[in-house]
Image: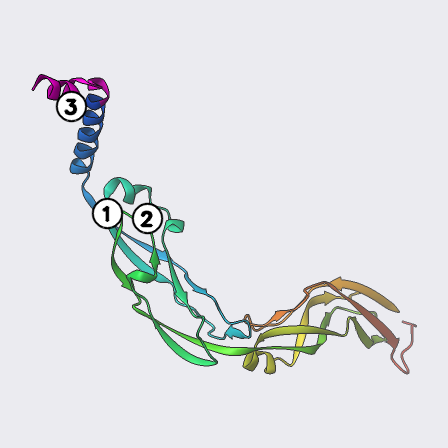
């Protein structure tokens, strides 16, 4: 009996006492920690989108995820700690509805998902298309009497755009930011940016363009006042 007590109780008694106190302290901390809930609004991440596909939905809803757990964890929770992921690797062109459940939510281990809004996400997919479109400069200004714009040149004259097929096919031209050419008599060159109004369509290589405005004298106009 003495050998048993020495082996299992007395031997390394200090370490065993410390371990017991730590375990007891942890249990008390957990037991005293009340449960809390919080709702976190997060974007929905689509993973493994096929190489030749684009999401063609103009608006992707966010997800409101309500989680429950120890108050100490809920208080420290940041929006980046919770996010929703949907695997769309099997998607094809067209519309598709995906369930959004607890298994799609990434969060700290000690938190429980109690509600997800919306419970489903409807997404449209389209094949990716890349094509060339003209650059259409926007020139404004007040010019000297007897002068008018004769020609507007853009360098480059076209740019490549890419995005969902139906959206790209609907784009007639890319447009520059407004260019104020007031006071130009012969010609002037301006450096500006170009954009496509459809937010789902992007320029393949976004770079400034050079726009040259060439003026001419109106036939029969006189400089005399």
Residue at mark 2: 108
Q: Which residue is mark 3?
A: 8
Residue 9 magenta:
yes
Q: From the viewer's perspective, is 117 left or right of 26? A: right
Q: Which of labels 1 and 2 is toward the front?
A: 2
From the image, tell me which residue sits under label 1.
69
Q: Residue at x 14, y 18 (%)?
A: 6
**Residue 44 sits in which quadrant?**
bottom left
Q: Nearer the viewer, residue 56 or 5?
A: 5
Quadrant of the rendering where the N terminus is positioned: top left
Q: Earlier in the sequence, mark 3 or mark 1?
A: 3
Of pointers 3 and 2, the one earlier in the residue sequence:
3
Q: Which portion, as a residue range, is magenta?
A: 1-15
Specify whether 208 is left or right of 65. right
Secondary structure category for the residue under label 2: loop
Q: Position of residue 207 (x, y in %)?
A: 71, 63
Mark 1 and mark 3 in contact (Cβ < 8 Å)?
no
N-term mark: 1 or 2: 1
Q: Nearer the viewer, residue 37 or 190?
A: 37
């Amino acid at each position: 009996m003495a050998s048993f007590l020495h082996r299992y109780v007395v031997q390394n008694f200090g370490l065993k006492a410390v371990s017991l106190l730590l375990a007891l302290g942890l249990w008390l901390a957990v037991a005293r920690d009340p449960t809390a809930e919080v709702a976190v609004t997060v974007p929905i991440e689509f993973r493994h989108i096929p190489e030749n596909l684009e999401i063609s939905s103009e608006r992707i809803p966010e997800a409101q995820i309500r989680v429950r757990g120890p108050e100490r964890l809920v208080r420290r929770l940041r929006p980046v700690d919770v996010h929703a992921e949907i695997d769309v690797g099997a998607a094809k062109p067209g519309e598709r509805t995906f369930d959004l459940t607890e298994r799609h939510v990434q969060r700290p281990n000690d938190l429980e998902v109690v509600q997800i809004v919306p419970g489903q996400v409807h997404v449209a997919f389209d094949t990716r298309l890349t094509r060339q479109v003209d650059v259409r400069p926007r020139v404004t200004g007040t010019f000297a009497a007897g002068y008018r714009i004769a020609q507007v040149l853009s360098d480059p004259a076209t740019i490549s755009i890419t995005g969902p097929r139906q959206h790209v096919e609907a784009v007639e031209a890319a447009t520059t930011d407004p260019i104020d050419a007031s006071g130009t008599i012969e010609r002037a060159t301006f450096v500006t940016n170009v954009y496509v109004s459809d937010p789902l369509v992007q320029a393949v290589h976004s770079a400034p363009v050079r726009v040259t405005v060439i003026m001419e004298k109106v036939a029969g106009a006189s400089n005399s006042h």
